[in-house]
């Protein structure tokens, strides 16, 4: 005779099926320290990391596509979105406005996707102080040296000497904000730095703020205690 199958009673300790909340990953550095390259690598590593497409009032560079690289707006349209609360963060950098549209970020986080921000310290501060600040993990990238930073800017071949000089002057102020970030890495080896970023994101996804089912699970555990004591 075949014995009946043994079944395990369902209790509050059963695995949770609730989807996690996404992270807001702020990645900052002075121009030329590698944040754009590492941002692309992180998105290639995990499709759950989505890029926040910023809005800007600057003119498109050769090859840039509206809606993919940036949302290119007139200054009047940008100001209107800010006044209507449509920007999660915004700042004026090198004479142009930059900002992160709020709606797509909230939709992605609620769907369990991480949103990656390639922004400066000003934008990072605004996001950390926003209603979504509890989901922020902030990372700052330092160059191995100032000489190497300038060499990388020149190697890109995108800017003239005046723009490079302006970026170099601004880099000192940007670097002075390094201590405001959760994690700080020296990008002297691109592959090693990418591994560090992956490790941080993997751990931060386990934060209690990212697991919406935890409150209900703890409540169920307390109810189980009550039943046992009753």
Image (cartoon, grey):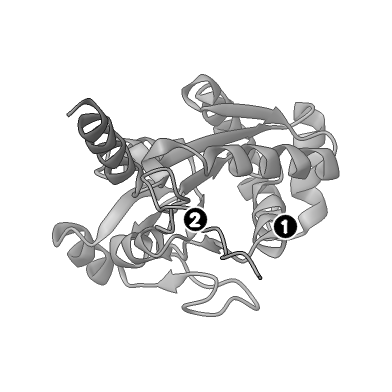
What residue sits 52% from the left and 19% below the top? 179
Q: CA distance from mark 2 to mark 1?
A: 14 Å
Q: Tell me which numbered mark, 2 or 1, is placed earlier along the sequence.
A: 1
For mark 2, give the secondary structure: strand
For residue 114, the mark is: 2
Task: Answer left or right for 56 relative to 76.
Answer: right
For mark 1, give the secondary structure: helix
Q: Which residue in the structure is indicated by mark 1?
A: 41
What residue sits 59% from the left and 33% below the top? 140
Residue 104 rendering spot, x and y as whole percentages: 36, 67
Return the residue nearer the eye: 220 or 126: 220
Neighbours of disc 1 within 10 Å: few (<14), some (14-19), many (20+): some
Q: Quadrant of the N terminus?
A: bottom right
What residue sits 49% from the left and 55% below the top? 114
Return the residue nearer the eye: 98 or 230: 230
Q: Is residue 211 above or below residue 160?
A: above
Q: Is residue 107 above or below residue 145?
A: below
What residue sits 71% from the left and 64% below the top? 44
Q: Quadrant of the C terminus?
A: top left
Task: Answer left or right for 104 relative to 61.
Answer: left
Task: Answer left or right for 83 relative to 208.
Answer: left
Return the residue nearer the eye: 123 or 211: 211
From the viewer's perspective, is the residue at label 2 or at label 1 nearer?
A: 2
Residue 99 rendering spot, x and y as whole percentages: 37, 56
């Amino acid at each position: 005779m075949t014995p009946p199958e043994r079944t395990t009673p369902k209790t509050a300790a059963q695995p949770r099926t609730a989807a996690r909340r996404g992270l807001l990953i702020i990645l900052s550095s002075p121009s030329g320290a590698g944040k754009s390259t590492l941002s692309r690598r992180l998105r290639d590593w995990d499709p759950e990391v989505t890029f926040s497409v910023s809005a800007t009032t600057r003119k498109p560079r050769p090859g840039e596509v509206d809606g993919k690289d940036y949302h290119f707006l007139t200054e009047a349209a940008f100001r209107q979105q800010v006044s209507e609360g449509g920007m999660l963060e915004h700042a004026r950098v090198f004479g142009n406005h930059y900002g992160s549209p709020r709606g797509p970020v909230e939709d992605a986080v609620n769907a369990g996707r991480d949103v990656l921000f390639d922004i400066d310290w000003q934008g990072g501060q605004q996001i950390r102080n926003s209603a979504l600040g509890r989901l922020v993990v902030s990372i700052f990238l330092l160059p191995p040296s100032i000489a190497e930073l300038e060499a990388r800017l020149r190697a890109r071949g995108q800017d003239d000497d005046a723009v490079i000089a302006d970026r170099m002057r601004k880099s000192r102020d940007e670097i002075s904000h390094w201590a405001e970030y959760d994690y700080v890495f020296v990008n002297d080896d691109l592959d090693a730095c990418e591994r560090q970023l992956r490790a941080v994101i993997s751990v931060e996804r386990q934060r209690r703020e990212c697991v919406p089912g935890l409150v209900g699970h703890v409540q169920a555990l307390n109810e189980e205690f009550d039943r046992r004591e009753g």
